[in-house]
Image (cartoon, rainbow, N blue to C red):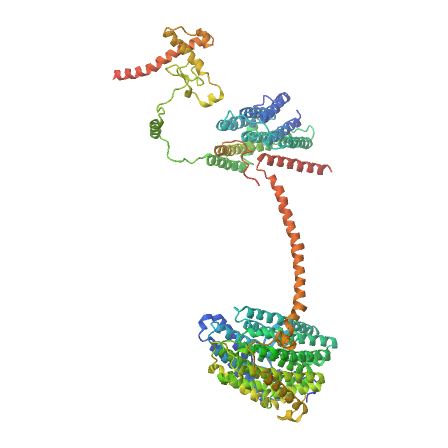
Amino acid sequence: MVNPLQTAILEPVAASGLFQMAWLMIAIPLVSAAFLLLVGKASNAWGHLLATLAPIASFGIGLALFFQLLGASVAERTVEVPVYEWIGVGPWDVQIALLVDQLSILFVLLITGVGSLIHIYSIGYMEHDERRRRFFAYLNLFIAAMLVLVLANSYLVLFIGWEGVGLASYLLIGFWQHRPAAAAAAKKAFVMNRVGDIGMALAMITMFAHFGSVEFAEVGKNAAQFSPLTATLVGLFLLLAACGKSAQVPLQAWLLDAMEGPTPVSALIHAATMVTAGVYLIVRSGPIFDQTPVASTAVVVVGTVTLLVGAWIGTSKDDIKKVLAGSTMSQIGYMILAAGIGPAGYVFAIFHLLTHGFFKANMFLGAGSIMHGMDDDVNMRNFGALGRAMRWTFLTFAMGYLAIIGFPFFAGFYSKDHIIVAAFEHNMIVGICALIGAGITAYYMTRLMVMTFFGRKRWEHGVHPHESPGVMVFPLVVLAILSVVAGVAMNSWINGWLVPAVGGEEHTYGLLDGFTEPIGWLTMGVVAIGVVIAVSVFKSVPKEAPRGNFLERAARRDVYGDDINNAVVVNPLMAFIGLLTGFDRGKVDGAVEGIGASTSGLGQVLRRLQSGYVRSYGLTMVAGAVLVGAVLILGQLA
Amino acid sequence: MNPENYLVLAAILFAIGTVGFMVRRNALIAFMSVELMLNATNLALVTFSRINGNIDGQIASFFVMIVAAAEIVVGLAIIVSIFRTRRSASVDDANLLKF
Amino acid sequence: MIVPLVTGTAVAFWLLAPIIVLAAIGMVMARKPVHSALGLATVMVGLAVQYAAQQAPFLFAVQIIVYTGAALMLFLFVLMLVGVDSTDSLVETLRGQRLAAGLAAFGLGALLVGVMGNAIVEGQVVGYTPEVEGNNVQQIAYAVFGRWIFIFETTAALLITAALAAMVLAHRERIGGRLTQRRRALLRMRKYAEDGTHPGSGATPGVYARHNAVDTPALLPDGSAAESSVSTSLAARGDVVDAHRLAAATKWALDEIDGEEPVGDERQVLGTGPTARGEVDTAPRAEVGAGDERSEATAEEDAK
């Protein structure tokens, strides 16, 4: 029995049997990516099919391992798979090893499962893109890097995957690099992620300085030896890393711009998997956060603020992908909030992460399907009445919608409810914020639904919406089904499964818990209010966006995220750099060039000595000889 | 006979040679001044040879003469070819190699 | 042994040293390069004597034969090529050069004198201790072909290289074909056809004149002097006898033959002493000689 208020300590057992093949999950997409990039045009015709098979193969292996774990006893569910010795210098011995446990295997299934579906979807979505092979290669690279991230047994190996997904994210956001906005967005994402990476590196350095190891198991065992200050520092460093990767306030600004990438990328990387890496990191680092209430509180605050800010942004955007991006920020805010609560919230964070992965990927892919039918238009004010034109898309999107607003018995209903309940238990203010967030979520998602699928046609001239091909609809259907059933399927089971790995209280939740608690009813009430307001406000949608009130205008500007960044970081830095360059130009260059100019000026004077008159040269020579001779003689005399 | 006198004579001749080289514009006279300097050193060498009772000074003087002969041949050929192209034997006219 | 001056070493030195220095100064100061060359020759011969006085008879000979005889004559040849009569302006064109040169040379001289005075131990003159039996030449041969053989052979290469270099430097590529006699004749005739230049050889100087010399222009049959018969450089230098004065005598003679009263006295016209009279006689003889040439040619034909 695990202490309910303690995070579980990892005690991995050696790998055997099928587990020794775990590295194949990473190797297959990695080799596929390298193959596609190296072989080049020769694989243009069939490269995307090969690339699609890679995550499916990984998913197969992951599924086999999952069942293996299911069959094993609880003590044997944490398996360490050594791959090879990376750095072995005396007492410091860094093994690259994979850690397969209840937590990581869920991530593996999410990444490879959703990843496979998105690969299949991309076959249709990217059909006419001439750089399709490269796109699929990058997707495979991302899958491999993300698997490294979640399967790592130490922070260092995790960091490899952490940077790998950052690279893949950069490449894929800027995939349409001919668009300046896309290139800029890619750069922005890359740079802001580096800020988070500093936190990650500092956290690792601190851990290594204290324990001589950065393995999860070692750190978990020794975390209690941290002084409170060190623990707080490491916790805050890790929170910074999580903020960068998961687009949490204050490093949230890149996610909205990242929507410049192709929509499958938004679905896979910027909704379902990569942006949730921060949640994973915090849950994995549970033993550290246990030691530091300050950092934990900071995590809760960050999560709460982000869930509200993300929802706020979502209410006023007209770009369908940006609404979803704001929603993603908001939902990850919920997860971070849950993770910040401590062992009591870890399970809920992961639960919500999984269901969110399903329904948000579903909705992103649905948005992609709409764009596919609307000639890549993303402005919802040009949509309307698409429900009949794109029936499959509408129905699957509706499943995602119901899931995210927490409609009873849909996935979000269970996962989000737990978080709100836990938030109320943790702190009344946080709970109220989470509750308000749920209401706003209902409001903006209803707004999205109404503007897109209902009402009058506001289509641009010459646009003829049509349903997407089967290869795109199939993943939508699968994800829609998961959005419906994932909550019901996992609600009673996931707690028992995850608690041994991440800690918390063993408790069996019933399917009808939401109806027996007052908070459940409260949540449903708030959600209903949000839906009703949205429906009544957006009965008719003007083609041009009204000026809106202060809140709307702020939301349209991403709650001044970029302005704050510019004012706080960019402009002071630029001014400082301007000073530096001014100093460099004026003083350093001036000194260097002054030396050069004076030398050449001296040369201008001295070259007059080169008169071309042999007799002058002779005179100089004789004078020099006299001088040298005189000096020698005087030297002798002295 | 004090050998120092010969050396003083050599020094005076050498100095006169340098003056000739530095002052005269005619390439031939400048060249003759160089020969004068060589002769002055030859005298000094012979005198040193006598002072030290060693024949090597005379040998050196002999080699100086040989080298001077070669130098005269080449130098005069250069003067002739310059004169042929520039119609002038003045060293000041050949002053193109300058700033 | 060629050491006749050994006993008179001091005499030879004090006699010749002033001459050598003066000649050297003259060499530097002379306006005409030829005078400079003469000054240098004087210096070299004087130095040769000093070599002899210092028990170096071999160098004495070499200095006279090679330096004064060969090298300096080469200088004179080049002087001829460049222009033996050119006179250098001694005005200094480089500002301050002369003063600076004088100072530098004085400094150098002072330095050298000082150094040399310091270099030798007072009055210590060691006589030659011959390495081998024999005279100076034999000792030099022993050294040159013994210890210094390698350097000696190197100098051989140097001399060959120098000779080759002189040939390369002085060589001029011929532009156009060789000027053969046939082509010369053709060119002459073409010139005659174009502007009437006389194709034959011009008059030689002094042939019909009283003075049988290159500086005397030829007198043409009409009594005028042929300006083109003397070298233009002589004419430019003003070394040519005045043609009109020469022609005056002929004119006087012709007038006399024509029975007219000649203008003035014969002596007065010629303005020379009795010797001139004899030379006047040569003129008709030369004229006859020219006729003899033709008669000789006919005589040869008669003989056939």
For residue A313, above or below residue C75: below
Observer-nearest of A287 and A534? A534
In the rendered view of the protein, which quadrant contains the C terminus of chain A? top right
**Left/right of residue C166 with respect to residue A108 in the rendered view:** left
Task: Name the residue located 55 percent from the left edge and 39 percent from the top edge.
Answer: B97
Image location (x, y in percent) of residue A550 = 65, 76
**Left/right of residue A262 with respect to residue C282 in the rendered view:** right
Image location (x, y in percent) of residue A206 = 69, 73
Image location (x, y in percent) of residue B55 = 59, 31
Q: Quadrant of residue A633?
A: top right
In the rendered view of the protein, which quadrant contains the N terminus of chain A? bottom right
Observer-nearest of A420 and B73? A420
For residue A53, above or below residue A185: below
For residue C224, above or below residue C196: above
Q: Count how many numbered circles sit on residues in the image.
A: 0
Task: Name the residue located 46 percent from the left edge and 18 percent from the top edge.
Answer: C240
Image location (x, y in percent) of residue A353 = 61, 83
Can residue A109 be seen?
no
Observer-nearest of C107 and C293? C293
Observer-nearest of A73 and B49? A73
Can residue C244 be seen?
yes
Q: Quadrant of residue A198?
A: bottom right
